């Protein structure tokens, strides 16, 4: 085996210091956010876990679909106006889970917001109206009566969303206090009937709630809905294309290089429907002139009109281009909506956890207290057992704790790591595993001393053996952490991340801190003198009796042996001989 | 402390030696009994699955002023289903109901808050669909299997396949006993428990790897000598790592016990406590199995290997010969012994101390270990002048 490469232990320490200083400088650079992101179980709030399921049974959920679902949910949650709301995915494909974490918001609201499925339809526009509600006094009574009948006949009218405000039962007062999420109001009917017209007239597109979407419409019915900006109200025929027919959509610069267009591609079914619809609609008069029907088709997402372009000409090949006054962002957004809007996923809420801020704070405090107690008890034990070496171990644990905090801050900043209770538990557990590295090393050094090595030799050759054991054992832990991180969902993941992180830190500390410090200590007179406080007193470790039992000779003889050995190896053994002289004297 | 230290020293030198490998029947019997008890506890009582696995709603009411029956009445009146209410010493009351919708859970949380004098918002609520727990477990199980496959490959390459088998047997042993204890005491199984079990798995393997590494070191080049059998070398390795195992178990268990104490005192039941209980049980069992199960299993597998058989035969023959010679030489225990097949001539006089056809004497084992550990025979050090 190669001689231990620890001739310059100072360099390793310097490397660690450089790493630490660099990390600290980067993580705590003034003006940047350098706090640890806490999970909701530690700061209070609501966490909802959703499992996406393909609409078509047996279909596979692609990464793109997942990413777009997250985008849409994030947009909705951001609409709550809560800072630090978080939407993340865990796992992939059909086994994926989407975790929505919102600090301090009532759970019912979050659940309602996220559970909606985004549905995209293309509908011919019948008419475009002003955004304000029209209240024709003379037909109001009729309409009310008809509407009541209509709800019985299943699908004449569908008005969604404001149960929260209408249902005044006592149990819902909590929900109402929190603002009760509502989704946009839409009007649907099988045919263009007077009741439908009345309800559309009553629709208020100046109410922001009605612009937020969240009310998937039935594509086979007529629809009255608002546009995203609240500029107008659309009356639309049943859909001619459903969003799943869109195979691709992209934002592109126009050929002149000024302005943006969105290009669209449809599958064969969509292409056929588009050809028919564009042929019919392009012959009609322009919308807004009062003519019904008129030449425009509406792109409806979740019950809100995202865009309503008109046809310039019949579109035959299944490739279309939407021109308009888009900037780059708008074009990209529209392309995204077209491409991903009709997500073939339904979201199932599988877990709702809502933790009050007080309890969250308590859990964090308990975790920290447990960590401090654990660290102190282990430190006391190590100090009592290993004396000065124990001090090295305690220092190492301290540096490891600091390094863990540093890494958590860095990962909070870069990959959005959140520290959960499971992570805190992982960190506390890691105290033991990290301490084990020192124990393995120290026990090896002691073994070497028992074999009659000098302290300097023992520190080096003990390290060579301990290093191998550490690498093998830590590799197993790291393997467990990595496999769990990539395959598990829920809190197991947070735990696995911290476990892996602490294992890496364990190695860094053992290689760059503990070992160099021990080697440096080994060169000190105090340690070499074999003081009983050093924790490495050869006599207490039994090196003396070991030698005796091996040789079966007298002490004097032993010393002579060492002297001759010294002569043989040119001074190699003189430290040992010094030790022995000391022994004989005492 | 110094007691343990002196003990460690004697263990290392083989003066005190516990027969971990030779008494395998005893350890197996003990483990078999515990495993059978665990399995029957699992079979009879089953696991007390938390709501994450059953589906349901869980309300934790801090500083509740209501009685358990009041809380139960409120919850059962509202949900119309069976409700379990438990009160922890910390004043936190836990109410577990049948699965609820989001809106229902908000309503019940408010009612419970009103009944127990706590604002509804202070109550920690968890609502879990019945499939979620199954999903977590399936995922964890998949991860577990893949991890086990990978780790077996690693162990087989780094050590040998017999060690991989030994490590997996020890691991299975730990998991069964931990799960058995959960079943026997009716402890609630939550996702946090699953995390704990997975940690135990990593910990158990880690522990076994440390012991096996020493076995590997002690048995390097073992077939080139005839002083020590494989069993003895392995047993010496276990003895040499006992002190480390005790220290490591203590330093690992102390923080976990701190979690249990703090968790139980400040929080009542919760993630931390669930996790810590699983860990405390698993770590204790893991330390036991790395010493008493993993190495004996390895030694048993090794005994089937022809080289190991031949080695044992050689060692026995040599000991017999030594005994006869000792008889011939009369009582001159220190007598010179003819050179043996041992590659290292040094310290051969030790062999003459063997006075019976028993296992190698502690000194022999120790000496063997020393010789086997290789590179230190000739200190590769430069002269002092050069070093400075």
Image (cartoon, coloured by chain):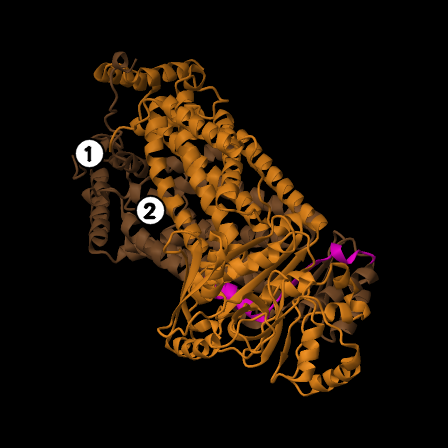
Colour for chain A in the figure:
orange
| Residue visible at 46% across and 79% down in the picture | A280
- What range is drawn magenta here? B117-142
The answer to if B97 sits in the magenta stretch is no
Quadrant location, the C terminus of chain B: top left
Task: Decide: few, some or many residues near mark 2? Use Cα within 10 Å; few <14, some 14-19, many ≥20.
Answer: many
Residue B21 shown left or right of residue A368 in the figure: left
Task: Decide: few, some or many residues near mark 1? Use Cα within 10 Å; few <14, some 14-19, many ≥20.
Answer: few
Residue A418 shown left or right of residue A197 in the figure: left
Near-viewer residue (A183 or A306):
A306
Colour for chain B in the figure:
brown
Q: Position of residue B192 (x, y in %)?
A: 57, 56
Q: Is residue A522 positioned above or below A428 on the image?
A: above
Residue behind mark 2: B234
Q: Taking the image as drawn, is residue B180 in sight?
A: yes
Q: Residue furthest top?
A: B385
Near-viewer residue (A205 or A563):
A205
Q: Position of residue B32 (x, y in %)?
A: 46, 62
| Chain of the residue under the numbered disc 2 shown in the image | B
- Point out the tag, 1 or 2, that comes first from the N-terminus: 2
Kindly identify which numbered label has been placed on residue A71.
Answer: none
| Callout 2: SS | helix
- Please tell me in which quadrant of the rendered image residue A445 appears: top left
Q: Position of residue A539 (x, y in %)?
A: 42, 24
| Residue visible at 36% across and 14% down in the picture | A578
By secondary structure, the bulk of the magenta-drawn segment is best described as helix
The answer to if B120 sits in the magenta stretch is yes
| Callout 1: SS | loop
- Please tell me in which quadrant of the rendered image residue B367 appears: top left
Residue behind mark 1: B344
Q: Taking the image as drawn, is residue B236 in sight?
A: no
| Residue visible at 41% across and 39% down in the picture | B16
């Amino acid at each position: 085996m190669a001689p231990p490469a620890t001739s310059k232990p100072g360099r390793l320490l310097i490397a660690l210091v450089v790493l630490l200083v660099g990390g600290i400088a980067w993580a705590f650079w003034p003006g940047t956010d350098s706090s640890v992101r806490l999970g909701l179980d530690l700061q209070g709030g609501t966490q909802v876990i959703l499992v996406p399921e393909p609409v078509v049974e047996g279909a596979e959920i692609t990464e793109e679909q997942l990413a777009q679902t997250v985008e849409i949910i994030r947009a909705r949650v951001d609409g709550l106006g809560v800072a630090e709301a978080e939407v993340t995915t865990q796992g992939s494909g059909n086994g994926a889970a989407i975790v929505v974490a919102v600090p301090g918001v009532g759970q019912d609201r979050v659940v309602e917001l996220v559970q909606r499925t985004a549905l995209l339809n293309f509908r011919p526009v019948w008419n475009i109206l002003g955004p304000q509600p029209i209240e024709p006094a003379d037909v109001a009574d009729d309409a009310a009566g008809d509407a009541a009948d209509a709800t019985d006949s299943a699908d004449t009218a569908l008005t969604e969303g404001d149960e929260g405000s209408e249902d005044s039962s006592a149990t819902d007062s909590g929900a109402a206090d929190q603002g009760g999420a509502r989704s946009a109001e839409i009007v649907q009917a099988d045919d263009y009937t007077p009741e439908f017209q009345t309800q559309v007239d009553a629709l208020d597109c100046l109410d922001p709630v009605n612009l937020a979407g969240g009310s998937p419409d039935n594509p086979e019915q007529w629809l009255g809905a608002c546009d995203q900006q609240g500029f107008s109200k659309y009356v639309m025929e049943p859909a001619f294309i459903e969003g799943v027919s869109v195979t691709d959509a992209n934002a592109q610069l126009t050929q002149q290089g000024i302005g943006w267009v969105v290009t669209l591609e449809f599958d064969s079914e969509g292409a056929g429907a588009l050809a028919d619809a564009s042929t019919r609609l392009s012959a009609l008069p322009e919308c807004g002139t009062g003519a019904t029907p008129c030449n425009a088709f509406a792109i409806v997402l979740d019950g809100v009109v995202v865009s309503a372009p008109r046809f310039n000409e019949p579109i035959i090949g299944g490739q279309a281009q939407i021109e308009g006054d888009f900037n780059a962002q708008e074009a990209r957004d529209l392309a995204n909506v077209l491409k991903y809007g009709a997500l073939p996923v339904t979201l199932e809420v599988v877990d709702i956890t809502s933790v009050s801020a007080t309890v969250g704070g308590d859990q964090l405090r308990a975790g920290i207290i447990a960590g401090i107690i654990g660290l102190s008890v282990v430190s006391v034990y190590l100090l009592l057992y290993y004396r000065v070496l124990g001090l090295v171990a305690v220092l190492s644990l301290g540096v490891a704790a600091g390094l863990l905090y540093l890494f958590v801050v860095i990962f909070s900043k870069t990959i959005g790591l959140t520290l959960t209770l499971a992570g805190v538990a992982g960190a506390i557990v890691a105290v033991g595993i990290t301490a084990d590295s020192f124990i393995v090393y120290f026990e090896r050094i002691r073994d070497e001393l028992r074999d009659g090595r000098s302290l300097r030799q023992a520190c080096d050759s003990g390290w060579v053996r301990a290093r191998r054991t550490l690498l093998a054992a830590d590799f197993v832990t790291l393997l467990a952490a990595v496999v769990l991180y990539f395959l598990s969902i829920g809190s197991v993941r947070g735990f696995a991340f911290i476990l892996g992180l602490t294992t890496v830190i364990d190695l860094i500390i053992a290689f760059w801190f503990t070992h160099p410090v021990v080697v440096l200590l080994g060169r000190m007179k105090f340690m070499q003198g074999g003081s009983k406080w050093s924790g490495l007193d050869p006599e207490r470790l039994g090196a003396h009796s070991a030698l005796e039992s091996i040789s079966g000779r007298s002490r004097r003889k032993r010393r002579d042996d060492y002297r001759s050995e010294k002569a043989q190896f040119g001074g190699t053994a003189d430290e040992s001989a010094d030790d022995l002289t000391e022994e004989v004297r005492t | 402390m110094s007691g343990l230290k002196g003990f460690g020293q004697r263990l290392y030198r083989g003066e005190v030696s516990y027969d971990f490998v030779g008494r395998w029947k005893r350890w197996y019997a003990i483990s078999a009994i515990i495993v059978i008890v665990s399995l029957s506890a699992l079979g009879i009582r089953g696991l007390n699955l938390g709501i994450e696995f059953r589906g349901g709603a869980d309300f934790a009411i801090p500083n509740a002023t209501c009685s358990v029956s009041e809380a139960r009445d409120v919850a059962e009146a509202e949900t119309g289903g069976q409700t379990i209410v438990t009160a922890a010493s910390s004043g936190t009351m836990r109410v577990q109901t049948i699965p609820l919708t989001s809106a229902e859970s908000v309503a019940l949380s408010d009612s419970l808050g009103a009944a127990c004098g706590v604002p509804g918002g202070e109550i920690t609520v968890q609502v879990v669909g019945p499939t979620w727990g199954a999903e977590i477990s399936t995922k964890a199980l998949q991860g577990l299997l893949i991890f086990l496959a990978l780790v077996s490959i690693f162990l087989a390459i780094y050590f040998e396949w017999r060690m991989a088998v030994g490590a997996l047997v020890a691991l299975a042993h730990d998991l069964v006993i931990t799960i058995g204890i959960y079943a026997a005491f009716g402890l609630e199984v939550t996702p946090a428990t699953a995390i704990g079990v997975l940690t135990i798995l990593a910990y158990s393997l880690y522990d076994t790897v440390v012991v096996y590494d020493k076995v590997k070191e002690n048995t390097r080049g073992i077939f080139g000598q005839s002083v020590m059998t494989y069993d003895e070398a392995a047993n010496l390795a276990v003895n040499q790592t006992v002190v480390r195992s005790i220290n490591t178990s203590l330093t690992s268990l102390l923080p976990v016990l701190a979690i249990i104490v703090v968790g139980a005192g400040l929080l009542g039941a919760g993630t931390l406590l669930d996790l810590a209980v699983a860990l405390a049980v698993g770590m204790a069992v893991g330390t036991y199995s790395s010493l008493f199960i993993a190495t004996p299993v390895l030694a048993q597998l090794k005994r089937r290997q022809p080289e190991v058989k031949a080695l044992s035969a050689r060692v026995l023959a040599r000991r017999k010969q030594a005994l006869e010679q000792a008889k011939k030489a009369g009582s001159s225990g220190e007598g010179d012994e003819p050179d043996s097949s041992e590659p290292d001539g040094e310290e051969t006089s030790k062999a003459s101390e063997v006075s019976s056809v028993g296992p190698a004497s502690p000194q022999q084992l120790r000496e063997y270990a020393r010789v086997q550990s290789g590179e230190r025979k000739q200190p590769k050090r430069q002269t002092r002048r050069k070093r400075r």
